[in-house]
Image (cartoon, rainbow, N blue to C red):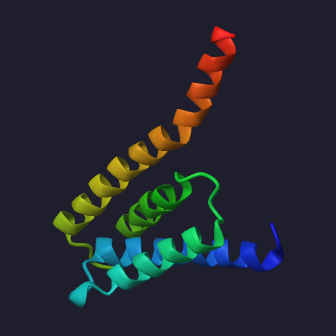
Amino acid sequence: MPSAARLLALAAMLLVAASAHLAARSEPGGRWVPLLVVGVVVAVVTGSPTRLWPLPAIWLVATLLALTGDAPVDPSHARVALVVGAVVLLAAIAVDLRPVLRARRRRGAA
C-alpha cells in the first residue's frame, strides 16, 4: 500500500474514532455524523480496509474510551453507540468470513 493510502487509512480510522467519542458523549447537533461519514467514505475510496471489521472495532474501542474518561457521558447515547457498534462489528466479521468459509468448502469438496 503506498504511503499516501496508508495515511488516508489512518485518517479514516481516526475520524471514525472521533465520531464514536462524540456520539458517546452526546455532543449537541450530531456533530459526530459528518465525521463518521467522511471516515467511512475515505476508507472506501482509498480501499484501505481489505476487511470491514476494523472500522466498527475502532468505533467500539473509542466508545469504551469515552466511557472511561472524565467528560460527562449520556448513558443512553453511550448504550446506543455500544449496541450499534457491536451489531455492525458482528455483521462485518460475518461478511469478512464468508469468502474464507466458501473457499474452505470448495477445497473440502474437491
Residue 72, given in percent of the width and then of the height, sits at: 27, 78
Instruction: Locate residue 16, reporting x and y percent.
Output: 47, 72
Left or right of residue 65, residue 3 in this image: right
Q: Quadrant of residue 110?
A: top right
Residue 48 seen in the figure? yes
As drawn, 8 above or below 82: below
Of 75 and 20, nearer the camera is 20
Residue 70 visible in this rendered orientation of the protein:
no
Image location (x, y in percent) of residue 86: 36, 49
Q: Which of 35 and 44 is in front in this view?
A: 44
- Tell me if 48 is positioned left or right of 90 in this view: right
Task: Work out which quarter of the rendered image holds the N terminus and state it.
Answer: bottom right
- In the rendered image, the residue lying farthest to the right is 2
Q: Which residue is drawn at 77% across and 80% down?
A: 4
Residue extending furthest toward the left? 76
Number of marks drawn: 0
Residue extending farthest to the top is 109
Image point 42% across, 82% down: which residue? 35
Residue plotted at (48% across, 42% down): 95
Identify the residue shown where x is 23% and y is 60%. 80
Residue 82 figure quarter = bottom left
Q: Is residue 93 left or right of residue 73?
A: right
